[in-house]
Amino acid sequence: MSKMIFKFFPFILSLGIVSCVSSEPTRFNHDYPAPPSVKRLTEAGACPGGEALSGVSITLPKFPWRAKRQGRQGWAVVSLDVGIDGTTNNVFIKRSAPRSVFDRTSIKAVESWQFAPPGAEQLSGCLVFISYRLGKVTIGQ
């Protein structure tokens, strides 16, 4: 009898594992936090001429797998400077909700962005709003 159990153990184990896999889509059980007014977060004189910036290479951040699995949603307001060569630097989170959940992926993506050179001077204090909602990432909405 015990030999028979050991013989079929891998089969029984695989049935148990397969039954744990769910084909249902992710359920977002966390409400989307109210986004801030980016204009109110902008400091006077910040990012002069930033409205004319032209993106050469803008990669969307990845939705963190742990947050997606937990059904988390949120946003981040990222501050950045754009050098005269169009590269980003001094990238940091100005504000986010929920705190720290989407910070790392937002910073990593923005640090890789490349813009057309903005002119003779660096732009500083530019802000970008990144939304993580229903498993999708959008910029500026």
Image (cartoon, rainbow, N blue to C red):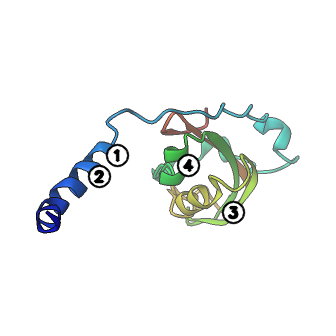
Disc 3 to disc 2, C-alpha distance? 55 Å
> Can you say whether 98 is above or below 104 in the image?
above
Three-letter amino acid code at the position of disc 2:
Ile
Is the C-beta separation of discs 3 and 1 under 8 Å?
no
> Which residue is located at x 72 percent, y 57 percent?
93
Give the crowd class for mark 4: few <14, some 14-19, many >=20 residues within 10 Å: some
Q: Nearer the viewer, residue 4 or 86?
A: 4
> Can you say whether 131 is above or below 96 in the image?
above
Q: Nearer the viewer, residue 72 or 129?
A: 72
Query: Which residue is labeled 1 in the image?
Result: 20
Whichever of labels 3 and 1 marks the residue nearer the N terminus, that label is 1
Three-letter amino acid code at the position of disc 4:
Ala
Disc 2 to disc 4, C-alpha distance? 23 Å
Whichever of labels 2 and 4 marks the residue nearer the N terminus, that label is 2
Disc 4 to disc 3, C-alpha distance? 35 Å
Query: Which residue is labeled 4 in the image?
Result: 67
The answer to whether residue 5 shows anywhere in this view is yes
Whichever of labels 4 and 1 marks the residue nearer the N terminus, that label is 1
Which-is-in-front pick, marks 4 and 1? Answer: 1
Whichever of labels 3 and 2 marks the residue nearer the N terminus, that label is 2
Which-is-in-front pick, marks 3 and 1? Answer: 1
Three-letter amino acid code at the position of disc 1:
Cys
Is the C-beta separation of discs 2 and 1 under 8 Å?
yes
Query: Which residue is labeled 2 in the image?
Result: 17
Q: Residue 29 is drawn in which quadrant?
A: top right
Whichever of labels 4 and 3 marks the residue nearer the N terminus, that label is 4
